[in-house]
Each structure stands twice: as C-alpha cells, then as structure tokens.
Image (cartoon, helix red, strand yellow):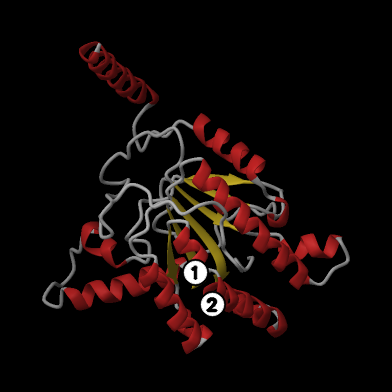
Amino acid sequence: MASHGSLPVSGHAVIAKSRPANMAFTSSTVDIPEARKCPRHIAMIMDGNGRWAKRRFLPRVAGHRRGVETVREITRACIDRGVEYLTLFAFSSENWRRPAEEVSVLRQLFLAALDQEVEKLHSNGIRLKVIGDVSAFGEHIVELAAKGEALTAENRRLTLTIAANYGGRWDLLQAVDKMVRRYPEQRGNFTEEQLAPFLALSYAPEPDLFIRTGGEQRISNFVLWQLAYTELYFTPTLWPDFDASTLDAAIEWYLERERRFGRTSEQLADAERDRSKKTDKGTRKVG
C-alpha cells in the first residue's frame, strides 16, 4: 500500500452544501441506494509505489513520495467530478510486516501530512477523517489526527478518509465489542442496525466504487463489511501513474455496471421507467 503523504488541494476555499455531521446512512442490504450519475463514495487501494520506483532504479521511498502527488491530483479530481467521499487505504494492519526502514518512512509521511497539510484541507472545505488503530503510530500522531478531524469537522466539499493501521477484520471485531458493551443485557439476536453505528466508516455511505491500482485483484482486508455491494475495479496502472484520466476510465466503467442489489434486470428496467415517468410529470407541471 502507499502512504498518502501530504494531502493539499488547490483552489479557493469553498464550503459546500451543509449536511448534518452525524447523518446516518442505510445499508445496501436493507435499502436500495439512489441511482447516481457519479459514484458518491470511492474507496481506493493505492498500490504500486514500490514497483514504480524499482522500474526507475530508485529506492522504494521515491515511489511513496511520488504517490503523494497522485493523492493531491486524485483528491482534486474527485471534487471536480462531484464525488462526496474518498477513502484511501494508506497503511494496512498487515503492512507492519514490511521492512522496518520502509515502515518508518511511511510513518514519517503520515506525520508530515497531519502536521503540515490539514490547514490546506480545511481552507478548501475538505473534512478529514482518520480510521484505524492509529495509537500504534504514537501519541503525537494520535493528537494530530484528532486535531485535524476537529478542525475540519463541519466541512462538506469532500470527506477524505485516511485508513491507517486499518484492517477490515479489526473493524468488525472492534464494532462487535462496542455493540456488546452498548447492549449488555442482550444475549444474541443483534441486528445490522445495531452494529452499523460502531463501524469505522459509520459516518459515510457505503462505497459505490472500489478502485485498486497496481494490477492485484483482491481487496486485502479493506472495509470488508462496507464493500458488500460495491463495484470492484482493478487496473494495472501503478499508483504514481494514476491520474484524472484513469479515474475517468474507472468512473465510466462504473456507469456501465447494472447495479441490481438483488433484483433482476427486468425489475431494474421497470424501476427506471417509473423514475422516468415521474420526472416527465414533474417537468410538465413546471412547464
């Protein structure tokens, strides 16, 4: 995985339309999400930094630093395209298995981002969220993450989530633990609605589109619960080479998908006709 490094975006400050910070989102296994022209939430595994550097006879850290620039570009591109939530897998709970030197570099990039870039995110109307067991990175990073989240809490132009020392299984276990402590008298028969508020991404809708760069075709313990009905897009493009045009290719692929959510194609076509009729009626009334 890549470190996200610095996360600035360019342009003037814009605070987009207001939405309650604690707004709840329903599950795709409970309700059918609204059809949209653009994915509302994109989740990404930023893979390929090391290979990008190796092909250029550079140290792996050079790939991670170049990946920082890609994060900047993709953050801007998501805003321009109307994406509301962008979740980036910066450091998995399994990445501690990497060489100690590389882990140290990734930690320093994370620290630099929290220390230097949060004000820029804030000035551009971006809300920062950090999920995962960040305590493993040390008290200073924990404090900076908390300050960054507090500073940007009311921003709604884009919610940028950094998953650091995160694992999908960890997320489910910590959520179950909190749920059981919340309902100490209940013995079994828990519901999805009871569990959902304790998941790390409870503040966001489920991802519509998952993108993994670098050619691997697996989700690698990333937001396991939330990807239940997400469209999965895999590209051989290495993360440092991923840009707005390759993002557009992923979104175009996504728009061609038939998102049935358990229904048949015929039911989907009927629902689309019903929506079109309602739209036509509304247009005639306005006219």
Mark 1 sits on what residue?
A: 118
Q: Residue at coordinates 45% horizontally, 82% vertically from top-left? A: 142
Q: Residue at coordinates 45% horizontally, 76% vertically from top-left? A: 145
What's the amino acid at mark 1?
A: Val
What's the amino acid at mark 2?
A: Asp
Q: Which of 251 and 190 is in front in this view?
A: 251
Mark 2 sits on what residue?
A: 115
Decide if residue 33 is on the left or right side of residue 123.
left
Could you tell me which secondary element the residue under label 2 belongs to?
helix
Q: Which of 230 and 280 is in front in this view?
A: 280
Mark 1, Cα crowd under 10 Å, few <14 / some 14-19 / many 20+, is: many
Q: In this view, does 129 lie above or below 11?
A: below
Decide if residue 111 is on the left or right side of residue 56.
left
Q: Is residue 115 above or below residue 90?
A: below
Could you tell me which secondary element the residue under label 1 belongs to?
helix
Q: Is residue 88 above or below residue 165?
A: above
Q: How far apart are marks 2 and 1 (CA)?
A: 7 Å
Decide if residue 269 is on the left or right side of residue 162.
left
Place of residue 68 in the rendered image (x, y in percent of width and height, measured from the top left): 65, 63
Q: Residue at coordinates 42% horizontally, 34% vertically from top-left? A: 259
Mark 2, Cα crowd under 10 Å, few <14 / some 14-19 / many 20+, is: some
